[in-house]
Structure formats: structure tokens, C-alpha cells
Amino acid sequence: MSRRNVNAIPTDDPSAGPVLEFQAVAMRYGRSPEVLRDIHLSLAPGSFHFLTGASGAGKSSLLKLIYLAHEPSRGLVRLFGRDIATLPRSELPWIRRRIGVVFQEYRLLDHLSAFDNVALPLRIAGRKLSDYRSDVAELLHWVGLGARMHALPPTLSGGEKQRLAIARAVVARPDILLADEPTGNLDHEMGQRIVRLLIELNRQGTTVVVSTHDRSLVEPSGMPVLRLEAGRLYGVSAAA
Amino acid sequence: MSDPPPPHHDAGARPGPLLPVQDGRDGALMFVIAVLCALACLAVLGGAAADRAARGWSADLKTSATVQVRPKPGETSAEAAARGAEALAGVNGVAEARALDRAAAVKLLEPWLGKGGVPDDLPIPELVTVDLDPAHPADAAALSAALAKAGVDGSVDDHGRWLADVERTALTVRVAAVGAALALAAAAAAAIGFATRAGLQARREVVEVLHLAGAEDRFVAALFQNRFARLSAWAGLQGMAVAAALWTLLRLLAPADGFSPLLPQAWRDLWLITPCVFIAGAIGAISARSSAMTMVRRGYGSGDGAER
């Protein structure tokens, strides 16, 4: 699977600095107390991190800030060298196209086939079916869903949905891949395969952040771990 | 997970629609738009017929005049009328002038006095009816001058007072028809806008996924625009067909020129409603796009205001 640049976006300086930088970032939902506080984070291009923490620690909220689904209540967020607070709304789509997301609840489109779900980011990017048909089919085979291309998501098992969501997240070769509990509905063997897939993508240059509370996935990998506790990011460490 | 793909597959033969095809509300919306389009078409057809009637009356009044003559001492009324008609017949811009005999004049009074209700001794003015040349009609001054020159004592009525009333009525009918059509179009636009917002709200999850996958606002708006343009055009076609069928039924059942002298129908009027399909489609597209753009820029609701 060759690397392909399908999205072009002007950046302040695309070749230098971290792909993601948080400085004193906080986040709240509405008028509720802050769920994230004083987050400092910098991700180098091509890095791989696990994001761990107990349920409710703020893992999904942190990922929402990264994939631009939510605005911080304070602090500085820079993505690909751009301060998102000053980013015009018209440029958000171009940033988002460089970020692949595996949602915890999959967020597949139930009325579209598995093939069309995976092809979604490519269609949105304006690619023609004839350009991406074989790539999508190949990817579906790669995640073990080659025989279920025409299936609708409601007819898939939890594990199949999970793999479909992963395929959709990586099909456009994003610069950053965020995975929120990507192995939550998979057995251990399939979970390990998914992690190996993510690591392989990382080796090709994709910056990967995997949110999980499954220590059995984290510890054997030896990858750095970001740990969230009660809304605070306590540090970066290599997995034991 | 690493099985090679088969050499041939038909996956993605045609991309599926990004918005779910079926929506229970579409049928109701289509019905509303079809009814509004049918009413708009009927308003246009009615306006065209009424306008034709008014134009006909106006043309009749413009190309005719009535002269009341008063006989000289020792002259009968009929002689005076005949002399008046003779004097007017030679005027430039007059096609024909003829004296109206008493029987014809009595007939004109019958609608008000009833048949046989005109006493024989009732003095009735002697009238000369003048048909004017439609291309270059003689004016009242020329007719009066001709009467004076011939020594006929008479007064000319060029129907100017009635003409103004008729033309004002025709203008009112035209404005009313266009106004009704515009009001119905506005109602259709409002209904489509409401349906778009409801549809976007109902598909919030889909729209959010599209946005997070990098869709621009205009991409999302175009999905709704295209959907409601097609729906509106189809509803417009149905509304137009219903209006045309009703109009045709009236035309076929009615005698001569139409259902009523006030609404003289003509087959060519049907051409007037053919743009309904395109106008309905355009209204659907514009209204849906405008509503969708407004809503996606606001964050399509339900959030806490900090979602992007």
C-alpha cells in the first residue's frame, strides 16, 4: 500500500515541528466542570502513542480536541503548524482530511455498504470511483472483510464493524490516526492483529494515537504511553 | 486479513447515496409542494384567462365610440341619426358608422327594464355606433368636428371612462395572479426550508461523520440541495399535471371559449405553466441549500456550542 498525498493544505511550516501541539489546554462541555485541564502535549511526526486512563478520565475528549470535533475552553492547539483558534472554518475540512479517526462507537453509516463506508473519505476528497475501487477492495481484504463488501453495517458483528471503522480511518493515508478503543469489541488475537496493523501504518509515517484501557495490548508493544487521570495528562513514558 | 483480493469483483459498481434514500417525511413534503404548485398553476391560468377577458373588453372599447344625436326642429330622430352616421362614415380612422334604430336601442335596455318593459312612448336617445380603425382610430375631437361640420347636434362618448376602469381591473387581475403565484412559491420555499432543517437534524449523525471525514459545508449542503431539488421538481411536475388536467376538464366541459366569459380559456395558456417544474426545482434547491448552509455553520444543533 503505497503512500499517497491526497490532501494538500497550506501550513505555516509543514516540514518542521510537531504535527500536534497542546499548550495549557482545557476543555469543558457547556457549563459543566472542565473534563480536561492544563494539557501540554507535543507529538512528533511519525510517532506512536498509547493513550490510557480509566473510564471517564477524558481520553475521548482529548481525541475530540485533536480531530476538531470540539473547541478547547482555553489553551493553544496547533495542528500541522496551524493555530486552530485562528483557522478559518473553510480550512477545517482540509485539516480533518489529514486525520483518520476510529470512533469508539464506530459511527458507520448504516445505509451504506461496507465498501462505500470505507470509500467515504475518498469520495469526500473528490476522488473518482475508478481511482479508488481497487484500493478500497484491497483494504477490505486486508482487514478480513473482502467477502462482506456489500454488507450493510447493521448486519456485521461488533468485530467486523470495528475493522470496517479502522479501514475507513486509514484509507486516505492520514498523517495522524486516532483510534478510540479500537480493540474494544475484538478478541485478543484480533486485537493484536489490529495493533500490528496500526504499528505498520505508523512505520509508513503515520502519527498514531491509540486510546485504550487494555494493558495487555499496551505492554507488549513497548510504545510510549500518555496517561490521563481525572482530566490531567501526567506524562509520557515508555510502556513497561 | 491478508487474503489477496479476487481478480474481479463488482464492489462499488455505483457509489451509494450519502444521505439515506428513504425518509417518511418526504411523501408528506412532496404532497404539500405538489398542492402548492397546482394552486400556483391554477392562479397563473386563471390570471391569464382574466387578463385575456380584460384585454378583449379593452380592445372593444378602444375601437368603438357612441354618438348621441339630437334632431333639429322638424327632423325625426331617425333622420338625425342617419345624418350623423353619414357624417361620421367619412372621417379618417372610422371603419363604419351606423345609426342604431329604436328596436336595437330598446334591446340594449332590456337587461335593466326587462323584455317588453320599455313603454312605446319612452323617449330613447338616438345613437350612432362607430367602429374605429384599430390601427389608427379617430379620436373624440375628430368625430365631434365632423359632426359640427355636417351641422349635426351630437355628443361623442369615446368610452374613455370605462376604458380606464377596465384597464385598472386588468392590471389588478394580473397583479393578483402574479402575487398569488409568488405567495405560493414562498410558501413552498418555507416548507422546503423547514423540511431541510428537519432532515438535517434527523441525519445529524450522518452529517457529523461527513464533516469529521473532511466534508466541506458546501458539500453537505449540496447533498440536501440535490435531494430537495429533485423532490421539488417531481412534486412540481405532479402539481402542474393536476392543474393542467383540471383546466383541460373545464375547457372541454365548457361551451365556446371557456368556462365563463370572465375566464376565456385558450389552449396555448398551458405553455405558461410548463416552467413550474423548473421553478419548483430551483426553489427546492435554493431553499434547501440556504437552510442547510445556515444549519451546518451553526453546528446543526443539539451540541453545547463548542462543537465545530
Image (spheres, rainbow, N blue to C red):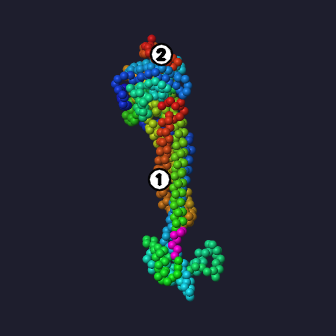
The residue at the far bottom in this view is B74
Determine which of the numbered discs, if any, sits on residue A234 in the image.
Answer: 2
As drawn, A199 above or below B239? above
Q: For label 1, count other residues whose C-alpha is less than 10 Å away and answer few (under 14), some (14-19) or many (20+).
A: some
Report the side of A206 relative to A62 (left or right): left
Please report the bounds of the magenta region as a residue range. Answer: B156-162
Q: Nearer the viewer, residue B139 or B179?
A: B139
Give percent across and percent down for residue A197: 42, 21
The residue located at (43%, 20%) in the rendering is: A41
- Which chain is home to disc 1? B
The residue at the far left in this view is A15
Residue hosting label 1: B275
Is residue B159 located in the magenta-colored stretch of the structure?
yes
Quadrant of image for the C terminus of chain A: top left
The residue located at (47%, 16%) in the rendering is: A234
Q: Nearer the viewer, residue B257 or B66?
A: B66
Give percent across and percent down for residue A63: 47, 24
Q: Are marks 2 and 1 in contact (CB under 8 Å)?
A: no
Residues at marks 2 and 1 on the same chain:
no
Residue A201 visible in this rendered orientation of the protein: no
Report the side of B62 relative to B6 (left or right): right
Q: For label 2, count other residues whose C-alpha is less than 10 Å away and answer few (under 14), some (14-19) or many (20+).
A: few
Three-letter amino acid code at disc 1?
Pro
Q: Assign a secondary structure to mark 1.
A: loop
Quadrant of image for the N terminus of chain A: top left
